[in-house]
Image (tube, rainbow, N blue to C red):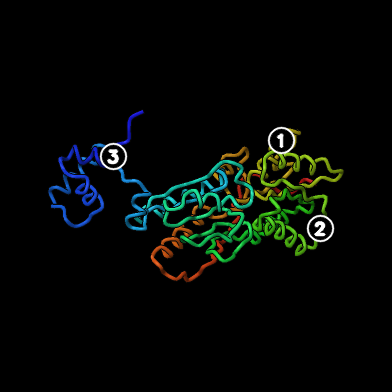
């Protein structure tokens, strides 16, 4: 493996001292314009980059914003796209980090922050399990498990979005509507279930606990939940999945049983990840603006890094229904 070039290599190639290289790279006084240009050119040709740790010790700033996620999955990937675009012209680099060592458990954020201490100026936490974190650097949470708390937060209107999904199905004439629920430790999942029940109540449709099955945002459990709903003596004519994965799983289970979607079963999801539009048939879903979540979090982070007071420390973005081809009036 090729050795990483050092500051000593740059000094030797440019014919100057290590101190001169350090001054030129960090823009400090004491180096002539031509010399500084030569040093920077040589550093570029050699592929030299000063370490984050060294930069931090010199200036207390690294110019890096960390994004911590529990896992690389469709939601976090879309959020990160928004973060990357928003950071593009800020002069900050983006460091995406997931330890991938069972960090779905509570407290993974603390471990991640500890491991990257001194290398980042601030951190954006995507769906953190806890928010009582050490305040040594600015922190912003996107869709935290517990909802708005001491940290600045950005999330989407899960309750209102669930009502949009249900109002759409009820408006088509469905009365037996199943729900594949999300993780019960997530406030956003609980809000979606509350929206499901609220819309039923508004329409005068009695809540039936047999029509709610746990999918936990997991493919296997969502398939099991969909199968259990379709096995009922009086199965639903429509199913609302708490996220797109559970909705797509429901479509697949129905099709494997010879049912037509939406002829025999209507299905609505939540999130509008890219896979929703590519599904067969394309999934009707509630769109939460995942990339905008990232945009808003970066705006907060940049304000905090500039020592500015946040005008709105807790931001909730609107959701909207995207009609595709998995919903239709019931046949019965």
Residue sitting at x 77%, y 45%: 331
- How crowded is the residue under tag 3: few (<14 C-alpha within 10 Å), some, or many (20+)? some
Give the mark toward the camera: 2 or 1.
2
Pick the residue in front: 59 or 79. Answer: 59
What residue sits right under mark 1 in the picture? 255
Q: Name the residue under label 2.
A: 207
Say which of marks 3 and 1 sits in front.
3
Badge 3 element: loop
Using the rendered view, name the quadrant where residue 221 is placed.
top right
Q: Distance between the residues labelled 2 and 1?
A: 26 Å
- Which residue occupies 69% across, 50% down? 182
Residue 11 x, y percent position in the rendering: 20, 41
Q: Quadrant of the N terminus?
A: top left
Q: Name the residue under label 3.
A: 6
Q: SS for tag 2? A: loop
**Residue 35: x %, y % from top left:** 14, 47
The picture places residue 52, in percent across and down from the top left corner, at 37, 48
């Amino acid at each position: 493996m090729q050795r990483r070039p050092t500051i000593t290599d740059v000094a030797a190639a440019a014919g100057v001292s290590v101190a001169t290289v350090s001054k030129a790279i960090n823009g400090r006084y004491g180096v002539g314009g031509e010399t500084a240009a030569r040093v920077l050119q040589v550093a570029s040709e050699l592929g030299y980059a000063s370490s984050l740790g060294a930069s931090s010790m010199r200036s207390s700033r690294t110019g890096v914003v960390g994004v911590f996620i529990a896992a690389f999955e469709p939601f976090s990937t879309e959020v990160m796209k928004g973060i990357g675009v928003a950071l593009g012209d800020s002069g900050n680099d983006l460091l995406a980090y997931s330890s991938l060592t069972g960090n779905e458990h509570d407290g993974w954020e603390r471990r991640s922050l500890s491991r990257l201490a001194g290398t980042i100026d601030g951190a954006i936490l995507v769906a953190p399990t806890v928010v009582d974190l050490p305040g040594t650097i600015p922190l912003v949470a996107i869709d935290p498990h517990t909802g708005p708390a001491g940290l600045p937060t950005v999330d989407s209107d899960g309750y209102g979005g669930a009502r949009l999904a249900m109002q759409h199905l009820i408006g088509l004439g469905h009365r037996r509507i199943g729900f594949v629920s999300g993780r019960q430790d997530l406030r956003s999942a609980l809000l979606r279930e509350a929206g499901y029940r609220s819309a039923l109540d508004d329409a005068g449709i009695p809540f039936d606990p047999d029509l709610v099955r746990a999918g936990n945002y997991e493919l296997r459990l969502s398939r099991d939940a969909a199968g259990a709903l379709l096995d009922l003596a009086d199965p639903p004519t429509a199913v609302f999945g708490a996220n797109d994965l559970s909705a797509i799983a429901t479509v697949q289970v129905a099709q494997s049983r010879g049912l037509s979607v939406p002829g025999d079963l209507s299905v609505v999801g939540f999130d509008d990840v890219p896979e929703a539009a590519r599904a067969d048939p394309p999934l009707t879903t509630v769109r939460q603006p995942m990339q905008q979540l990232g945009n808003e979090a970066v705006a907060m982070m940049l304000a905090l890094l500039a020592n500015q007071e946040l005008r709105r420390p807790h931001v909730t973005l609107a959701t909207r229904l995207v009609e595709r081809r998995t919903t239709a009036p019931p046949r019965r």
